[in-house]
Structure formats: C-alpha cells, structure tokens
Image (cartoon, rainbow, N blue to C red):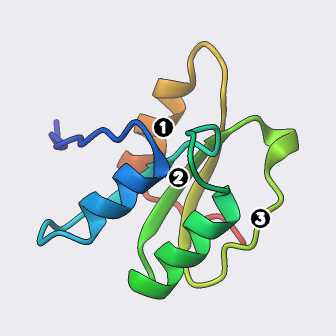
Amino acid sequence: MDHHLVKLADCKAGILSQIQGKQHFDVLIIDPDLPDMEITTLLKTLSENLPGIAVIIHAYLNDINWETKGLVILAHVEKKANSIDAIRKSIMTSQKVPV
C-alpha cells in the first residue's frame, strides 16, 4: 500500500504559505469552507503559481461552481460521513475529471 505524507492547513493562507516553500506536493485537497480567503482567490493563486497542480475539491456538490482553469482536478468529493474513502480512492486512482 502506498503511503502519503499529509500536511494540514487551518486556513487558506496556510495553504499558500506551505506551497510557497520548497516542498513538493503531489495533490492538494482543498476545502472551500476554510476561513480567511475566498475560494476563487485561492484557486486563481494556485493556478498562477502551480500550474498543473493536482487538486481534489472537498465540498458540498451544490457549492462547486468555481473557475479551475490551470488546475488538474482529480475529483470533486462531496462532504459526507465517508468522504475520506472517496478522497483516498481519488488519490489512488488519480482519475482526472472534466473541467
């Protein structure tokens, strides 16, 4: 079984500070409900600074309507009790969804 190093951020600015370091990330799991920044601003910043970065958006499906140009969306995973399983499956299969 593959192992993954997980880095947590408690706000969107925390995500940006981690990706601006020297670390490499294979995939970002983005929760639009994190405080301190509009999700559209975060996604735009990610696409400008890390074009082609793989992203999983973890949100309520009726809330997903953002511009994701420049990002590789692996999955839109709906928030629910077993969403961690869907996130794991998305990472393991790395299937891209149409943008």
Q: Quadrant of the N terminus?
A: top left
- Tell which of 90 and 16 is nearer to you: 16
Q: Is residue 76 above or below residue 88?
A: below
**Which mark identifies residue 21?**
none
Precedes in sequence: disc 3 or disc 1: 3
Q: Disc 3 or disc 1, which is closer to the eye? A: 3
Precedes in sequence: disc 3 or disc 2: 2
Q: Is residue 97 left or right of residue 12?
A: right
Residue found 52% across the figure and 60% down from its top = 95
For label 2, the crowd category at 10 Å Cα-Cα, with few meaning under 14, some 14 to 19 and many 20 or more, is many
Q: Which residue is mark 1?
A: 87
Which of the 4 image quadrants contains residue 10? top left
Are discs 2 and 1 less than 8 Å apart at CB?
Answer: yes
Q: Which residue is mark 2?
A: 56
Q: Is residue 49 above or below residue 65?
A: below
Q: Amino acid at mark 3?
A: Trp
Residue found 28% across the figure and 66% down from its top = 19
Residue found 57% across the figure and 84% down from its top = 70
